[in-house]
């Protein structure tokens, strides 16, 4: 039986009812004050724990060999220009169990990248006008089965926010089983931004992210940041010097009576915890100097949206959205952030000297709120003069105005097609245009929502006719511009390049995008991860399907211990197009300095890890690598004018359909 093709509801109900009812019960919320089983007196208290920033990862190897991430069209052999890069950084990441002391005296089992929750931050820098490429080796050292839910924790790592080739995008069916590994290649051929990497394995994305498989990823242009006059992380400052830029990963959890995580997806609608975490710490207290700070805010929750504000009513300045810096910074007293959205904000604490200011959550429509979910974290503002005033002055609005993000330069007159997308719940299924990921799998991965030509521009209308749920919709590969919301201008905070859009109850959003960077198949899904797992995900295809860039078959995970990552050496002769994306070759590993520590933001003491599970033999799960069709995709026609670009090829005559369970009734 091909498990990735199964009805997700059946899979999860069986596993939850059969193996997890004691430790992670699938149950109704217990009370209006709390979602946890654990006695309220034992739960963490707001603002008692010290803030900490996730560790910045250090590459295991680097090289300064430039290249270009070329590809070729399968029909003509023509070169597809890729993103030039100035060198490569190599990271080795192990997905493995660890423990975290959220509750005093209790070790809660988590899964982390390198055993860290959240995982280590990747920072890659623009060098000589070009970003550095990243090769990330992901090794699945998770147990053969989840200790209580009983599912096999296969993984697929998605770099959310930077374009990747299809085989490195974290495709839901490109599964790395426990005991396997895969090298992901990221050209970073995009504007500076806050991205993040997280698990995307089919059926179990929500559980794997909830267990801790998430971290931020920054593409940094230091010269541009200095020009904009914003607070920034200075890697050249000595150890002990305070920093003024920090990630904030906001999430929520609930606890079983034994202090372990409790998973309650509320009938597949979404998990709402009663404990708010920031960077893995419950309601932390952060000591800051009386000056400006920059925060890279990510909503890492499974289902909870936030409307953030300061307790004293002072404003934030929004300087960047999902896809990078805005053209015009927006001053707001609150902003809404759905799951997977990222906003970079500046808070000026100068006038708050000696005070305690809370970051609060006013909540969003139809959320499940508990006693302390209106609190997020606290800032404790010192009285001494700031250590440094760099990035503390007014923002250079002229420098912001000169920025021209490609997505924000687009006009509706460039669009060659308009497509309509309906987000609904039909007969118990979360669907997009009445389609699910099961439908994609049953088509042998050929069914697509759209087949835009490379470099074409389209308008997508996204309709949420439900009255009970918002859907943060994510389109892989591209950045887009939000045109309007129910015919009105977008909210101030979302007037920048986006890759996730908050589609509220009974709203229709129009977005405008260009399909650039790569060709191939990419996912579209709701980032309420319970909705995604049950089955609100489809795909689209840019241009041709290149069998050499197939999402599943081109670069499958490997078993056994992975080889060491070693940098490339400069070629004797200039590389021809196509030679810039090979795996690393031999060479010496240069020393890489450690990132300076920041005493003002103390690290939480390390907790002992649970023993590693020996690499198991591949579980007796269904084969994940199907035969990739080489024929054109099945796609509906756009709803408005026929594109001037070549039309998609006729529907394929595919080989025999994969063996799957009987089609479920809708």
Image (cartoon, helix red, strand yellow):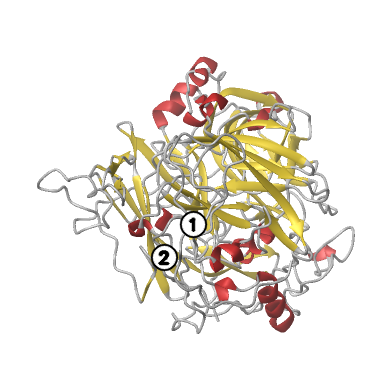
Tell me if residue 113 comes above or below residue 191 in the rendering: below
Q: Residues within 10 Å of mark 2 (few under 14, many from 20)?
A: some
Tell me if residue 620 comes above or below residue 486 in the rendering: below
Residue 171 in the figure: left or right of residue 210: left
The N terminus, quarter of image:
bottom right
Residue 366 in the figure: left or right of residue 658: right
Distance Cα–Cα, label 2 vs label 1: 15 Å
Residue toward you, 359 or 384: 359
Residue 185 in the figure: left or right of residue 297: left
Q: Nearer the viewer, mark 2 or mark 1?
A: 1
Give coordinates of residue 455: x percent, y percent: 43, 36
Q: Residue furthest top?
A: 398
Residue located at (56% from left, 72% from top):
4
Give coordinates of residue 576: x percent, y percent: 18, 45
Q: Residue furthest right?
A: 32
Tell me if residue 392 comes above or below residue 233 in the rendering: above
Give coordinates of residue 421: x percent, y percent: 66, 46
Residue at the disc numbered 1? 651
Residue toward you, 176 or 410: 410
The label shown at residue 628 is 2
Tell me if residue 51 comes above or below residue 157 in the rendering: above
The answer to whether any part of residue 398 appears in the image is: yes
The label shown at residue 432 is none
Residue located at (59% from left, 47% from top):
474
**Mark closer to the chain start, 2 or 1:** 2
Residue located at (50% from left, 22% from top):
229
- Label 2's element? loop
Residue toward you, 149 or 384: 149
Give coordinates of residue 75: x percent, y percent: 31, 50
The answer to whether any part of residue 244 appears in the image is: no
């Amino acid at each position: 039986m091909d498990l990735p093709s199964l009805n997700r509801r059946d899979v999860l109900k069986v596993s939850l009812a059969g193996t997890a009812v004691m430790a992670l019960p699938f149950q109704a919320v217990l009370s209006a004050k709390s979602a946890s089983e654990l006695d309220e007196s034992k739960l963490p208290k707001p603002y008692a724990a010290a803030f900490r920033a996730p560790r910045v990862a250090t590459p295991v190897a680097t090289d300064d060999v430039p290249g270009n991430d070329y590809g070729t069209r399968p029909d003509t052999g023509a070169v597809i220009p890729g993103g030039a890069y100035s060198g490569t950084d190599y990271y080795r990441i192990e997905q493995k169990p660890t423990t975290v002391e959220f509750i005093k005296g209790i070790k809660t089992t988590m899964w982390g990248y390198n055993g860290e929750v959240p995982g280590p931050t990747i920072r890659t820098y623009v060098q000589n006008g070009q970003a550095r490429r990243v090769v990330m080796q992901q090794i699945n050292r998770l147990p053969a089965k989840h200790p209580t839910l009983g599912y096999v924790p296969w993984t697929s790592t998605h770099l959310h926010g930077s374009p990747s080739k299809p085989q490195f995008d974290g495709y839901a069916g490109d599964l790395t089983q426990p005991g396997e590994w895969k090298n992901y290649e990221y050209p970073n051929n995009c504007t500076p931004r806050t991205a993040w990497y997280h698990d995307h394995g089919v059926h179990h994305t929500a559980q794997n992210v909830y267990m801790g498989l998430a971290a931020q990823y920054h593409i940094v242009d230091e010269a541009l940041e200095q020009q904009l006059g914003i607070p920034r992380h200075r890697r050249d400052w000595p150890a002990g010097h305070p920093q003024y830029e920090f990630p904030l990963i906001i999430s929520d959890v609930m606890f079983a009576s034994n202090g372990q995580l409790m998973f309650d997806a509320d009938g597949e609608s979404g998990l709402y915890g009663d404990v708010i975490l920031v960077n893995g710490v419950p309601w932390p207290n952060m000591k800051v100097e009386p000056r400006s700070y920059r925060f890279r805010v990510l909503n890492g929750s499974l289902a909870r949206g936030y409307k953030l504000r300061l307790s004293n009513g002072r404003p934030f300045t929004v300087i960047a959205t999902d896809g990078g810096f805005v053209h015009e910074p927006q001053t707001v007293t609150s902003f809404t952030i759905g799951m997977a959205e990222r906003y970079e904000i500046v808070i000026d604490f100068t006038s708050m000297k000696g005070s305690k200011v809370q970051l609060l959550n006013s909540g969003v429509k139809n959320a499940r709120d508990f006693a302390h979910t209106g609190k997020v974290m606290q800032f404790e503002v010192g009285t001494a003069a700031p250590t440094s005033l760099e990035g503390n002055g007014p923002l250079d609005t002229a420098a912001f105005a000169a920025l021209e993000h490609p997505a924000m330069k687009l006009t509706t007159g460039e669009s060659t097609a308009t497509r309509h997308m309906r987000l609904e719940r039909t007969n118990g299924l979360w669907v997009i245009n009445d389609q699910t990921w099961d439908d994609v799998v049953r088509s042998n991965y050929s069914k697509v929502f759209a087949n835009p030509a490379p470099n074409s521009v389209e308008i997508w209308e996204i309709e949420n006719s439900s009255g009970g749920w918002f859907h943060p919709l994510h389109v892989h590969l591209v950045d887009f511009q939000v045109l309007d919301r129910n015919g009105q201008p977008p909210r101030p905070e979302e007037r920048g390049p986006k890759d996730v859009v908050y589609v509220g109850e009974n709203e229709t959003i129009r977005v405008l995008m260009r399909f650039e960077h790569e060709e191939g198949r990419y996912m579209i899904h709701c980032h309420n991860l319970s909705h995604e797992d049950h089955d609100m995900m489809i795909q689209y295809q840019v241009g041709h399907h290149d069998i050499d860039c197939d999402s599943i078959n081109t670069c499958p995970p490997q078993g056994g211990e992975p080889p060491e990552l070693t940098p490339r050496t400069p070629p004797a002769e200039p590389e021809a197009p196509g030679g810039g994306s090979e795996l690393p070759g031999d060479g010496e590993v240069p020393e890489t300095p450690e990132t300076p520590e920041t005493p003002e933001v103390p690290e939480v003491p390390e907790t002992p890890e649970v023993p590693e599970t020996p690499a198991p033999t591949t579980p007796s799960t269904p084969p994940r690598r199907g035969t990739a069709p080489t024929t054109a995709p099945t796609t509906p026609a756009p709803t408005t004018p026929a594109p001037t670009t070549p039309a998609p090829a006729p529907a394929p005559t595919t080989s025999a359909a994969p063996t799957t369970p009987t089609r479920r009734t809708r």
